Amino acid sequence: MDYNTLVDNITKKILQELAQREKPSWEIQSQKPLFSSANGKWLPIGISARHVHLTREIFEQLYGRGKELTIYTELYQPGEFASAEVITLIGPRLRAIQDVRILGPFREYTQVELSRTDGVALGIDPPVRKSGDLKGSEPIILVGPAGAVSLKEGAICANRHVHTNPQDAERLGVKDDGIVKVRVSGVRAITFENVQIRVSDKFLLQMHLDTDDANAAGVKCGESAELMK
């Protein structure tokens, strides 16, 4: 049996098992901040649940030639959206996570963004990386209604980062690709280190945390964190 046939047989078996389970709910984390971005050095928080970014080519392998992404809900960053389309992720030990949202628009690379907890569930160890830094990252299988794709690399834990436009970057005293600390107050107060700054005129000010970091700090979308130089 060749490799592609083996992958097909494995994915069919897992999909049959998943079909018997109740589908989990999924809520996009896109709430707008509760305060003005001009308010001192406070940053609105956005929480990124597990999701994937796909090239058009990979999407068509999963959903069929000529298919397009359809908007489920728009995200906080301009031009970005959560699509109605979802896929199943399968790890090397045949562990699976289903109903993983595809974010649009299409990208030039395929990237699977997970929390460390998701990695444990799948039986993989995704490295913490900047977006697009995929060399040597974890392999994973993507399964859609029209087919499956086995990636040799592509699964990561996204690093902590802050999106900002040039105007807010200047006000905050930060530069593109700079590294800062960010403090979250409250009952589970915590200071996040190694937070990357990403500057683009396409961005609105927002700090992105994955679900593990957000749970550790006890924060929700739309709450705030303080930039510490």
Image (tube, rainbow, N blue to C red):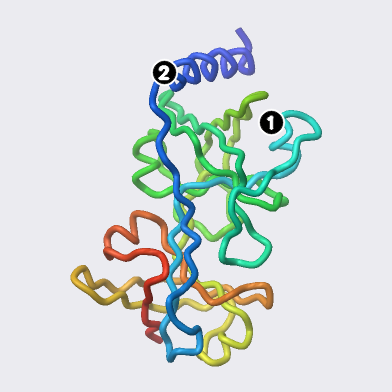
Dot 1 amino acid type: Tyr
Quadrant including the C terminus: bottom left
Closer to the chain start, of discs 2 and 1, is: 2
Residue hosting label 1: 63
Q: Nearer the viewer, residue 125 or 46?
A: 46
Residue extending furthest left? Answer: 187
Q: Nearer the viewer, residue 118 or 16?
A: 16
Q: Answer yes or no: do the residues labelled 2 and 1 have beta carbons within 8 Å?
A: no
List x then y, in percent, for residue 165: 62, 80
Residue extending furthest top? Answer: 1
Within the image, what quadrant is residue 218 found in? bottom left
Q: Is residue 98 above or below residue 204?
A: above
Q: Is residue 169 above or below residue 73?
A: below
Side of 135 relative to 97 (left or right): right
Question: Residue 20 got which mark?
Answer: 2
Q: Is residue 98 above or below residue 111?
A: above
Residue at the image position 61 percent from the left and 39 percent from the top: 85
- Mark 1 packing: few (<14 Cα in 10 Å), some, or many (20+)? many
Dot 2 amino acid type: Gln
